[in-house]
Amino acid sequence: MEILEEKEEEQQREEEPKGLKISDNLQDGDTTVSANDFDWSSIDTSQLPSSYKTNSLKEKKLLHVADHFLWQYTHLCPDRKLLFLHPVNECGMEVWGKFVSTTVRPTLLPYTELYHWDGCASFVSDYLTMEPLKSPITPPSSLYSPTTILKYQRGNCFDFSVLLCSMLIGAGYDAYCVHGYATREMCTLDRTLELCPLQVPKKGMKKSNKYRVKPPPDLQSKFELQQEAKKKAEIEAAQENNEREEEKVMEVEKCKRDPLYGLRVHAWVLVLSGKRDVPETFFINPFTGSSHSTMDEHFLGIESVWNHRNYWVNMQDCRNGCKDLAFDLGDTIRWEIMLSGSHEPLQLLPDAEEDKELSDRDMDGVVSDPNVSCEFETRFPQGRKVILYKKAKLEKWAPYLNGNGLVKRLTVYADSDCAEVVEVKEWFKNREDMLDMREVNKQTQLTTEYFSPGHLLSLKAHTYTSLGPETEHTMEFYSEARVDGLQKRVKNAKEMTEYFVGRDDFLHVRHIEFHKRGKKIHLAGTRTEINSQPIAQIKECFHRNLEKPADEDVAERIFLITENMIHLTYHLKDKYITASKKDFYKETESDRKGNEIFMTPGMWSSEKDKKQLHLYKLLQELTKEEKRLKQQVQQSEAEVLNILKICENEDSAVKLSVSIYNTERNEKRREQHEAVEQDLDYLAPFLIRVGYREKLTKAQALRVRDECLTDLKHRLLDKANIIQARFEQLQKKNQWFQKNRNRLSAEEEDDFLTRYSETTSHIHTLVLRLNREKQTASQKYLALEEKLHQDPRLAEHLAHA
């Protein structure tokens, strides 16, 4: 309580010093947390580079500058907390430590997903295990390198932030680590008050069309509709208000119960606008990987920010959290910079200029590149991660960890205690049956499975309560992959409805009604035996065929099997109120045995008088069509049973597919790749030129060696020229865009920015590869030269050359 009273008194002062103020008069019992099970003192540091264990001359000079800056800061701002400047690293450098900016190392991993900020943030939050700070109100005494954090897959908020910031800067973003204060829920990774992102419905943008056809007038009473809508809105608003009030009460109670509100130390990442076409500055919480506005109430203040080049101290008032902060780091009044060589954050500079300027700084070269190689596919610690949300639990697994291909599961509960399960959603990957997601409603026991394109029977979705044939099944198909254009089929014990699209006969709906099942029959051309269901009625609906007159284009036809009737309804003609109809009454049983059919006036009924010959031919066609439809219905029944059987077999024996490009898992592909490499002769193109047969002369051997080495040089130069040409082309496009930006339409501008962002990312990747090629070019040259000297075809002549 003394802390809160002191805080309230400070807020009431008229002249309050800028920055953040927190009290040191806290009891030890309120600031400590339970120790972690992992023992950091037992980690192996013998394999780390020497730069992790010692400080170079540049580092020592930099640390002296940092100490002098800290002395001035504490003298001018005695009420502020000590800055987080040079903590101890994993090698135990307790005398000096390592300057925090040297721990941030721009790195770009070779995965497409990590070329964008959301992919980097998601990877860090998934790959690492969160550890709370030993003291929630003070920064940690140590800061380990990203190499060690990736190796052991765990760390605190500062470790998370440094790793994420390194990856973002490597991907081309203007990112900074932030040392500040946040709420308890954010510091402790408590997400039980948040809705799971998978539960939040995505709002689709409705496209407006000013040329749309006006709907017919609504003849209902608008007043009655308004009154009903008003009552519903009032009831829904009351329910929503009650829920919001309950949530607010719970949040307020939690905040009130937190004696350290506003004092809890947290670290996150700041991404400034400008680079990579980031339109607006935002925060990233490294624990969750989600983005937040700089106005977010969960962030309560900032002490300092840093990147791999400099360190800035916030001199602005944080009594309203981060809402009123300006993030112009070049403003020396709001941000105190430590290294005065550059007062502005290096934004919007080409990569080549950045590398050149970076090499001129005293900070550069003081830390070796961290070894960030990691099992990207493993993704989670021990392959699994569990996150608790508000009335929900999200479980994640690495691919191929589960035998059924399960990678994600969301369990939704009815209460906050997570006792009663309402719904379960499961996501799958790499399954041969192309199953992508499964939803199970535990209250209705309704299961819905979603399949990716490529299923054996073009299945898209399947909804059922059980795999028994007597229960209702709703099956959706990829109609473009089927010959019959079937889009959806709904089947139960009494009826079946099929929906079609894109058919030449304009059929779009077929509805069948059944009687009880009879004896088993075997369908020709299939291996399936089904219990034949007597068909009571077949109803088909057709779209309008504009090539036919409306009164000759059938809109609906019904085959009443048990009543021996066929009912036809034609499309409605213009300016007509009723549609044309025809009813046919089929012959008796004795006539079906082969006797000739005679047309009588009692066998047909039509609103339009036609000759009996035309009606006779029409009846014959309809009789043949009825037989064909019966067979088609039986085939549909067999297909339903076949799908149910396949689904049951696939669930009992799940098979996972492996891409041919995944040589680590695909053994056959790896064996083929190794066999091809063994068969390839790297000297074959050069031996052909000199006319090699059995043995080379000395002149030929020297020529082969020189041409081989020259070819390597040319390939390296060509690669550099291609990258340089693409980079210059991008610069020209950027200059043209800046000149003509005001003349472009909004659509053209958005399209250009989208393509420019993608091209910038590719160029940035190519520049990194080029730098790596330059560093390894001499090694490749020497390795090839040594290989040539050891080649048995050249060794005899090159030994003394």
Image (spheres, rainbow, N blue to C red):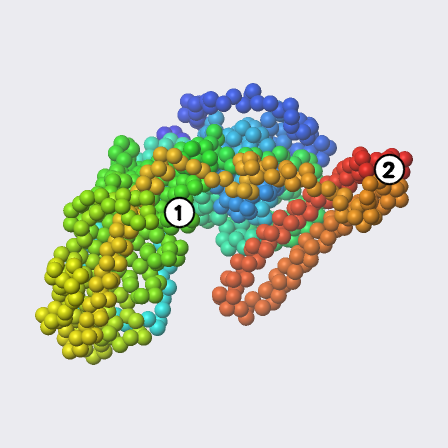
> Does residue 685 appear in this view?
yes
Q: Position of residue 243 (x, y in %)?
A: 25, 44
Using residue 451 as the reference point, say whether residue 143 is left or right of it. Answer: right
Residue identifier under label 2: 798
Kind of residue indicated by mark 1: Leu
Q: Nearer the viewer, residue 99 or 627?
A: 627
- Position of 288 compared to 530: left or right? right
Q: Earlier in the sequence, mark 1 or mark 2?
A: 1
Q: Which quadrant is the C terminus positioned in? A: top right
User: Please, which residue is most extreme toward the left here?
Assistant: 602
Between label 1 and label 2, give the one nearer the viewer.
1
State whether residue 177 appears in this view.
no
Quadrant of the rendered structure where residue 568 is?
bottom left
Q: Is residue 306 left or right of residue 546?
A: right
Residue located beneath label 1 in the image: 456
For badge 2, the amino acid type reads Leu
User: What SS does tag 2 mark?
Assistant: helix
Check disc 2: other Cα within 10 Å, few if <14, some if 14-19, many if 20+: some
Please provide percent x and percent y for residue 650. 37, 38
Q: Residue at x 82, y 48 (%)?
A: 691
Whether residues under marks 1 and 2 lie with C-beta atoms below 8 angstroms apart, the answer is: no
Where does the N terminus fall, quadrant-wise? top left
Task: Return the residue nearer the eye: 489 or 62.
Answer: 489
Question: Who is closer to the viewer here, 129 or 793?
Answer: 793
